[in-house]
Image: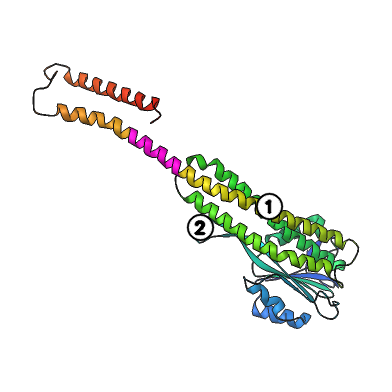
Amino acid sequence: MRQTFSIGSDGLLTTGHAQATRYWINVERPTTVEINQLVQEFNFPRDYLTAVLDDAEISRTEQLDQPQQTQPGLIIMQFPKLTTSDLGYLEYQVYPFALILTQNVVLTVSNYPASFIQDFVMDPDSSRLSLVDHENFVLAIMWYIAHAYVQALANINAKTNILERHLTRATRNEEIFRIMAYQKSLIRFNAALMQNAPILKAVAASATHFNAAGHQQLITDILIETQQAADMTKTTNQILQQYSQMVSAVISNNLNDVMKVLTSLTIILTIPTIVGGIYGMNVHLPGAGLVHAFSWIMLGTIILCVLSLEYLRNHDYF
């Protein structure tokens, strides 16, 4: 799917480019026809677009040391996306995201919808960035990619807090599977952020790109956001490792409590069974000739059950 944006008279991003000299093209899950059209229209290598079709594509840059008039520049970064695992639990995957800088047009290409693109379009402050300085525009998108990790980690922390509140009643392995999904996400985040870090350094060191006033400040903001995401990933991963061990212990303890209660109930319910079995024998028993024998036997049974219950409760067996 191909979307085209330009800057309207109000300074905001608008759909289409009409007669605009500079505009932005966002492409999601490009088809073969769209790839061929874009390659022919902007004259850049085909692998600039096909790279994002490979989910295992690594982060990289191309032609950032050459003037834009010579060859369009390419930046590929990894971005996080919320998905559902095969077991049905929410987890994050990371996928490649390409930014292509031509002389007049910025192209962003991904094989999956990126939520931060919608955030970028809907954010009035970012939307007022002029496409005349499209390198500034690209840096803003790169900041949103870095910030997407921070948001994802905040979401994982929030989900973990909810899980912690439900932990006192946990008796199944469902909580462990959820933690496993979060840990897998953090492992992917760590690998992706390690890949993105050299790309940001390459952008900062480029001799022909991102050298205008204010660009270094934007690059510094991106580096800070990326470092924040890396630190959060490390910290959250350590917390989840400890939490995973704690969850296993709590689930085991909760199951022991359940078994203790069930065992105590079994002991108490055994008393009426024993009394009923004894007085059900076809022999002469004490009190069998009384008019209210059944009532006295029931009363005695209830008293024995209550005494047993109090005994078990006082010894913390119930």
Secondary structure type for disc 2: loop
Question: Does residue 77 sit above or below 173 in this rendering?
Answer: below
Is 71 situated left or right of 279 in this image?
A: right
Q: Is residue 284 above or below residue 142?
A: above
Q: Main secondary structure of the magenta part?
A: helix
Q: Which numbered dot is residue 305?
A: none
Q: Which mark is residue 88?
A: 2
Membership of 86 in magenta stretch: no
Q: Which residue is mark 1?
A: 232
Q: As drawn, which residue projects farthest toward the right?
A: 213
Is residue 128 visible to the viewer in this orientation of the structure?
A: no
Which amino acid, by three-letter code, is at mark 2? Gly
Compared across the picture, whether 118 is left or right of 209 comes to: left
Q: In the rendered structure, which segment of residues is drawn in magenta?
A: 252-264
**Based on the displayed image, in which of its 4 quarters is residue 71 positioned?**
bottom right
Residue 24 in view (yes/no): yes
Q: Which type of secondary structure does the marked residue at label 1 adopt?
A: helix
